[in-house]
Amino acid sequence: MMDRHLDATGKGEINYDYANDILLFKVKDRDYLKSIDFDDFVVDIDKEGYITGLRVFDASKLFRLSKLSLKNIKQFDFNAKIEEKVITIQFYFTSVMRNKPSIRHGQDLVREAADARINNSEVVCTVA
């Protein structure tokens, strides 16, 4: 059961490191505390225990998209939950190619953070 919820609608930002193929998402104006490292991504946790950042490594391979598509992301939805030390992130986005929106892309990332000291929480962020 989710007992803590952060509505960060309109407060997100996204950046893509083309050279290193790293997609970065973060919620603005949140105080960073720690990171939890998984094989293909890192989750940032703020001082209140919310997931407020996500770094996806080898993003073009994970999303099966060109680097150019990832460089041109314009709209995204991010929903992150922590329940009983299981982290679930739903990340969906639309990129623009040749001035036309492409198909909506996304990924559900689910990992167990058994050794982490984290509380149940949920973050919702949408940027259009």
Image (tube, grey):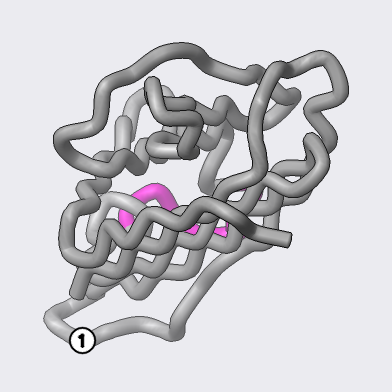
Residue at 19% x, 75% y is 128
Query: What is the quadrant of residue 90 in the picture?
Result: bottom right
Rendered view: 70 above or below 102: above
Residue at 53% x, 36% y is 56
Q: Position of residue 36 (x, y in %)?
A: 62, 19
Of residues 109 and 115, the one nearer the viewer is 115
Residue at 63% x, 62% y is 107
Of residues 52 and 22, the one nearer the viewer is 52
Compared across the picture, whether 8 is left or right of 117 comes to: left
Q: Is residue 64 magenta?
A: yes
In the rendered image, which residue does mark 1 sit on? 100
State whether residue 21 appears in this view. Answer: no
Tell me the kind of residue under disc 1.
Answer: Lys
Query: What is the quadrant of residue 20 in the picture?
Result: top left
Mark 1 residue element: strand
State whether residue 102 appears in this view. Answer: yes
Q: Is residue 99 magenta?
A: no
